[in-house]
Amino acid sequence: MKINGWLFVDKPEGMSSRKVVDLISNSLSIKKVGHAGTLDPLASGLLPIAIGEATKTIGVIQQFKKCYKFVIKWGEKTSTDDKIGTTISSTNVRPSLQDIEKNLKKFVGKIEQIPPKFSAIKVNGKRAYRLARKKTNFSLNSRTVFIETLKIKKQIDNDHCSFECICSKGTYIRALARDLGEAMNCFGHIYELRRTHVGKFSHKCSILLDLSKKLIHSSEILKNILPIEIVLKSLPFINLTKKQEFAIKNGQNICLDELNIDEQKKNYFLSKSIDDYMICKNENRVICFFKIENNSIKPTRVFNL
C-alpha cells in the first residue's frame, strides 16, 4: 500500500525532530519520511511530517510563517542559548518591562541574525552542533530573517518573561532570546519554547502520539494523514489534459501556447521567478512542480501518485 501525505504531530519536549521521523518511518515501514522545520529537543509543538511523495513538498511548507510562544530567562548566557546548555556568563542586571518593550522594536521587521552554534547549519559540510560539541573553533555568518510580530505576553517575575512571535523560515528563537538579552546588557536564554502554527496549520490539527514507544500502531497514524494537496492549495496552477499529463510524466515539456489559458494567465506564469512554486494538476490531482523555460512548461519534480 502506498502512503502519501502529511501528518501534523504535537512533538513533546525532550525529543529530537529526527527521532519523531524515525519513529513514524519504522512504524509505517516507509523510508521516505521527513519533517518540515526542525524543532529543538527543548521545544514542543507543531511538527509537520511528510510521508512518501509528500516529501517532495517540504520546500513549500518550509516557506510558511511560523508562530512561537516562548519564555526567556534573564541573567544567564548559555552555550546553547537555552536552558539545556551550560552557563558561560551571568549578571545581576534584570530588565524592566519598559526596557523590554523599548528593545523589542529593534527585532521587528527584517533583521540580521547569527544562528546558534548548536544548530543544524552546515559548516564546510559538517553540522555546526557536531563541531560545537567537539569545541571546534568556528564562526557562523549572519542571515536575514523577518519578524512579523514580537509581543510580550506576560512578565512572569524578575527572571522570566513570556513572548509570542510570528516569523519567517530560518529564524532561530534561541538567537532572538540571546540577542534581546545582549541588547539590554542582561543576557538571556530560552527557558520554554512551543511552536503553535505553521502557516494556517495550528496545534489544533496536530495529533498527540505516544512517542515513548518504539513503534506506534499504523492505524493510529493512517487515520490522521492529510492529503499532499493540503499544503499546495495557495499555489498557482495549470490544469492539464490526460495526454499532456502523460507527456509530462515522460519527461516532455509542453509549450504554453498548447494550453487552454488566456494571455493574462500566460503572462502571469512568465513573470514568476525560478524559485516560485507552481504546479500542474489534472482533476485536482497534483502532477508536478514546474518552471517556465523557452515559453514552455518544464517539470522540475513529478509526483508518482
Image: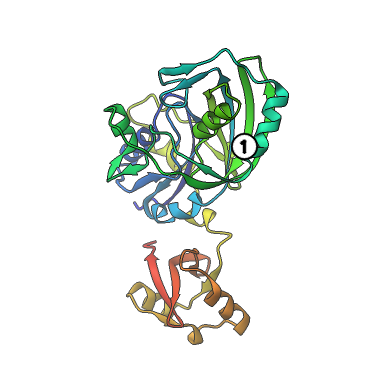
How crowded pointer 1 is (Cα within 10 Å; few <14, some 14-19, many 20+) is rated as some
The residue closer to the viewer here, 116 or 57, is: 116
Left or right of residue 71: residue 132? left
Q: Is residue 200 above or below residue 250?
A: above
Q: Quadrant of the C terminus?
A: bottom left
The image quadrant that residue 53 belongs to is bottom left
For residue 289, say whether it is visible. yes
Identify whether 281 is placed above or below 81: below
Amino acid type, callout 1: Cys
User: Eyeballing the image, is 299 above or below 22?
Assistant: below
Query: Residue 174's x, y, as percent?
Result: 50, 31
List the single residue furthest toward the bottom.
257
Element type where label 1 sits in the image: strand
Q: Position of residue 89 (x, y in %)?
A: 46, 18
Residue placed under numbered mark 1 in the picture = 165
| Residue toward you, 111 or 258 | 111
Q: Residue furthest front?
A: 185
Residue in view at x 35 percent, y 53 percent: 2
Task: Tell me residue 239's x, y (percent).
Answer: 52, 74
Residue 169 visible in the displayed image: no
Give the tally of numbered discs.
1
**Outermost residue toward the right in this view:** 98
Residue at (43%, 34%) from the top-left corner?
Answer: 116
Q: Residue at x 28, y 31 (%)?
A: 136
